[in-house]
Structures are given as C-alpha cells and as structure tokens.
Image: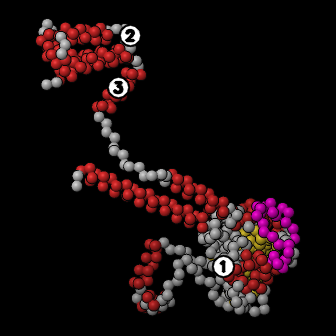
Amino acid sequence: MTESTRESTEQSAAQALVWLKDRLVSWTWLLALAAVLSLQVWFPAIDAGQVNDTYNVDIGGRNAFYQYVKGHIPDSRRNHESLPILLDHLYDATLCLLGPARYPSSREWSALGQWVQNGGKLLLAARWDDAELEIPFVQARVRSTKPKDLSPLEEIIKRSEKQAQTPQDAEASGDSSEPASSQSPAPAGSAPSPSGTKWTKLLSGTNFSWKSTGTIDAPGAEALVKVGDSVQAARIALGRGTIVLVASDQMFSNSALFESGTQNGLLAVRMLQAAGPVDAVVFDESLNQTGRPVVVGVLLDPILRSTTVQIVVVLVIFLWRGNRRFGGTLPREAPPRHDVADHTNSLGNLYYKAHHGMGVLREYLEQLRTDLRLRFSTGHEERVLAPIAAKLGISVEEVQRQLAQADAAARKPRLTRREAAAQIRRLALFRQAARRN
C-alpha cells in the first residue's frame, strides 16, 4: 500500500468517526427535546414546590374537604391575598388554616387576634409533620411529640450502648431481650401516633382514625378530641370569637376523608361547626403560596407550568443549534506552523503600509554587501565581483554600476515602492549568482 493510499484511508476513517460523533450528538439533543415536549402532556409530581392545599388532589391534599364544604355552603371561597388585608373586610365567616405551608408571622398573628376578639371564627390545624405551634395572643400551643432526629454519630453511639447492655440491664430498663434482627425497625422519619383511648365530644362514638405528632397545651380550653391523656382538639374562647385548635391537619386530608368504615368526614365537619354557626367559609391559601420555595414554587405552579416548559424548549433548541454544525463534514485542517517566514511577511506588510521602501532597499543592500564580503575587500571589488559577472554574462563594470545605482536610490529622501522593488529584484540576481555553484 502506497503512502498516498494509506493517508487517504486514514482521512476517510477520521471523517467517518467525525460523522458518527455528530449524529450521536444530534440524536441526544433530539431525545432531550422530545422529553421536554412530553412535559406538556405528563408532568411528574415534584414535592419541592407541592403543598397540601385545597388544590392538591393527592392523598395529603385538602381538595376533597374543600369540595364538600363548597357544595354544602355556597358562600365558600379561597383566599389569596394577605391575611391582614383579608381580615379588614371579613365578617360572619369561618377562616380555615389547615396545616399551612408556613405559620403566620407576628403581624399576621396580631391581625388574627384582633379579628377573633371582634367575633371571628378560626379553625387552625397544625401541620402533621411539624406540629410545633404557639398562638401568641392566647395561652395555647401545640407541642410536638415527634422524636428528635439523631445525627449519624449519635445513632452509632446509641446502638453501641444498646449492644453493650447485659440481659439484666435490658430487662431492668424495659427493653426487649429479643435479638435486634428479629425486631422490625421503624421507618426513617416516622413518628408514633398518640396511644390510648380515643374520645371526642363531637361524635356519639369513636369510630374515627387519628394520626398526630403533637399535643395541645391550652389551660382553660374546652377539649373536643382526646387520645388517652393527650388533647388533640380544643375550643378556645377569645372575646366575642372562637378558636378551634387541632394538633394535626391529617383529619382534613383526602386520604383521611376517603377511609372506609370511619366517620372521619363527619368529624372534620363537626370541627368546622365547633367554631360557631357556619354561614361562610374562607380557606386561606396565602400562607401556602408564600411558604413554598420561591423559584421552584412559582415556576412549577400549574398556572405557569406550560410557560416554563416552553422556555426550557427554547433553551434546548438554542443549545442544540450552538453545538450542531449544519452541512457536510469538513476535513480536518492541518495545524498551523509558525516560522521565520511569518515574521518576514509581517515585517514586509508593515514596511508596505508605512510606505518605507527606501528602508527595505537599504537593509537589503547592506545584507548583500555582507554576504559578498565587499566590506572587507576595499580596493579588490573587481576580484570579488568577477565570478558574479561571469555567471550573469555581463561585465564587472555593469555590476558595479547597478550597485552604485542601488546605493544612490537608498540615499534619496523619497523613494517610491515600485522603484525600490525594481532595485531589490536586480540585487537579488547578484545574490543568487553568488550562491550558485
């Protein structure tokens, strides 16, 4: 195989590899674009921006309770404006704060306290996963019973202490003597529900389920629901108004209302009625909107979700266009080489732009005299120039005359580029003749 054939084969293989790589990149971007476009049809559930509000139809949402109340009390609505602004013009209505994404601020607590004292009715349920809640204008709070999450180091220390216990120590401390492998560990992040006999003032029986990670501390409040000795729902009188405080919002969730064989739905409605006559109901969503992550919550909100997907589609197309070379695959270019010729060309361009042909001629003439050793042959120029004249077929006097003309041109105060080029071409013949064997 010849050298040219081998180079052609290598070049063809390199072009094929570049073509395959280009196609793979194109298919990757095409799949990414198809995946983004599919989000317009199906969007995965993302917990980062999802809250348990009255719009949520998942198991933790409040949509079922809202739809039921809306169907039986026509004057029911959602609120999206700030609580202090809402409470300035809210009369004869029951306000529901069912496990909001964030608890009210001090300014909102102050507005709520003034509104309840003037005759407002408030149904407030703490979050099931974060029950720690304190109402500043009354002596009432929900205390969390959820065990504190241990750090990995604390968990290792606790496990080692438990393994180091003797059977007598374990029996004295009340721990089971069964091996650790036979005990089913509790799931991570789980919290025990209150244990004991269930009791409620709102129903004739106790056919309801209750899940909570908190307990109510409210001296003087009327207990509505109790599990063992733990108060789970209480009614608090304040001025002319009433507050129904619930230790867990799980009772109002979609999953609790759809539990078969229980009276969870009836108990949730009775809690709403416990605050007073129900003429109108307002479900607050302002705390849910301001409590979710700002960027994720706004961009992935169902109202703006389609716009967000369109922006992502445009971004994918833009990135694809920036990484895609349209048209045929170009051959690989040879790497540039920099040598003295680049320097010579650059210097010639500078002389050309500066109209300094006289300087170029002077430098060339000085270099020629150095190459012909005329500087060291004073009085013997004819002996040095005789071989050059013989090679060119002219006389020595003609060579001396042309050198004198070039020297006179280099001393002119002004010399055109055309004349300087002509002199350099004649001198170049002498230089070539001197180098010719």
Q: Could you say which quadrant of the image residue 17 lies in?
A: bottom left
Q: Quadrant of the C terminus?
A: top left
Q: Residue at x 64, y 66 (%)?
A: 40
Point out residue 98 in the picture as x, y percentages from the top left corner: 72, 73
**Residues rendered magenta in the picture:** 69-92
Amino acid of disc 3 = Leu
Amino acid of disc 2 = Arg
**Discs 2/3, front:** 2
Q: Which mark is residue 59?
A: 1
Q: Secondary structure at mark 1?
A: loop
- Circle 3/circle 1 CB separation < 8 Å: no
Alpha carbon separation for disc pair 1 and 2: 96 Å
Chain-order first, disc 2 or disc 3? 3
Q: Could you say which quadrant of the image residue 251 lies in?
A: bottom right
Q: Secondary structure at mark 2?
A: loop
Q: Residue at x 43, y 90 (%)?
A: 179
Q: Residues within 10 Å of mark 1 (few under 14, many from 20)?
A: some
Chain-order first, disc 3 or disc 1? 1
The residue that mark 2 highlights is 414
Point out residue 152 in the picture as x, y percentages from the top left corner: 46, 73
User: In this orientation, does residue 331 appear?
Assistant: yes
Q: Residue at x 70, y 85 (%)?
A: 258
Q: Secondary structure at mark 3?
A: helix
Amino acid of disc 1 = Ile
User: In this orientation, does residue 103 appear?
Assistant: no
Q: Residues within 10 Å of mark 2 (few under 14, many from 20)?
A: few
- Circle 1/circle 2 CB separation < 8 Å: no
